[in-house]
Amino acid sequence: MKTDKTSQFLWFIFLILGVWFSIETVNSTFFGFELAIGTALFGLIIGLVLHKKRNPSELWDSFVDKRSFFRSQRRTTYMFFFLAVVGFLNSYMLVGEPEYLDTEIIEKRISRGKSTSYILAIAPEKLGTLDLKVGEEFWNSQSVGNTLMISVQENIFGLYVVTDYSTANKTLKNSDT
């Protein structure tokens, strides 16, 4: 089956944006993983509902696609679109003033994959747990049990996003996420 170049381009753009914003959401938002999974499932369901198969009587090599633009998109295009939109709104549509919280580092680890990530696991009382990715130098200067001061701000979904972090006795430092 031939695919329209516009549809391929949209799918690729939304794939890149959806993955990028999903990673950013998971790395900086309390309950960000749950938000990303819920959004992906919602977008996939919308894609399944809106997508309409080609008429079986049409030839497979036909260059004419008589479906409407929205019904001719791949099912996953909708999923990546919603991931990109919700991820953007999650990270950049912050409401209210930032809150500064002191939290203890409960775990310190290195994640090695295609690139090395330095992770400090934190768990403020009201907010839940978060694996905060930090720079190597900051990671080396911390140990389990140290107090970390984080700046969190509520987004339009009611979730809290970490905007800054530092040791509890120093000024806030911009995060590396």
Image (cartoon, rainbow, N blue to C red):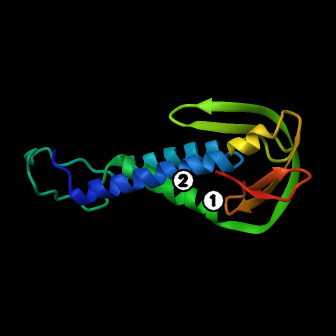
Q: Give coordinates of residue 91: x percent, y percent.
A: 63, 59
- Residue type (three-letter) at the residue carrying disc 1: Ser
Q: Is residue 71 visible?
A: no
CA neighbours of label 1 inside 10 A, class few (<14), some (14 to 19), many (20+): many
Total numbered labels placed on residues in the image: 2
What residue lies at 78% left-to-right and 53% top-to-bottom?
165
Q: Give coordinates of residue 16: x percent, y percent.
A: 43, 52
- Residue type (three-letter) at the residue carrying disc 2: Phe
Please state if 67 lies on the left or on the right of 121 as rendered: left
Query: Pointers 2 and 1 in contact (CB under 8 A)?
Result: yes
Instruction: Name the residue furthest bottom.
Output: 96
Q: Which residue is mark 2?
A: 21
Q: Give coordinates of residue 146: x percent, y percent.
A: 88, 39
Please state if 85 lies on the left or on the right of 163 as rendered: left
Q: Nearer the viewer, residue 166 or 90?
A: 166
Closer to the N terminus: mark 2 or mark 1? Answer: 2
Give the CA distance from mark 2 to mark 1: 8 Å
Can you tell which quarter of the image residue 162 is in?
bottom right
What residue lies at 30% left-to-right and 54% top-to-bottom?
73
CA neighbours of label 2 inside 10 A, class few (<14), some (14 to 19), many (20+): many
Residue at disc 1, secondary structure? helix
Q: Quadrant of the N terminus?
A: top left
Please state if 175 lies on the left or on the right of 4 as rendered: right
- Residue 93, compared with residue 103, is above or below; it is below
Q: Nearer the viewer, residue 161 or 138?
A: 138
Q: Which residue is mark 1?
A: 91
Q: Which mark is residue 5?
A: none
Residue at disc 2, secondary structure? helix
Q: Is residue 92 visible?
A: yes
Q: Give coordinates of residue 11: x percent, y percent.
A: 34, 53
Instruction: Name the residue furthest right.
Output: 169
What residue lies at 80% left-to-right and 57% top-to-bottom?
151
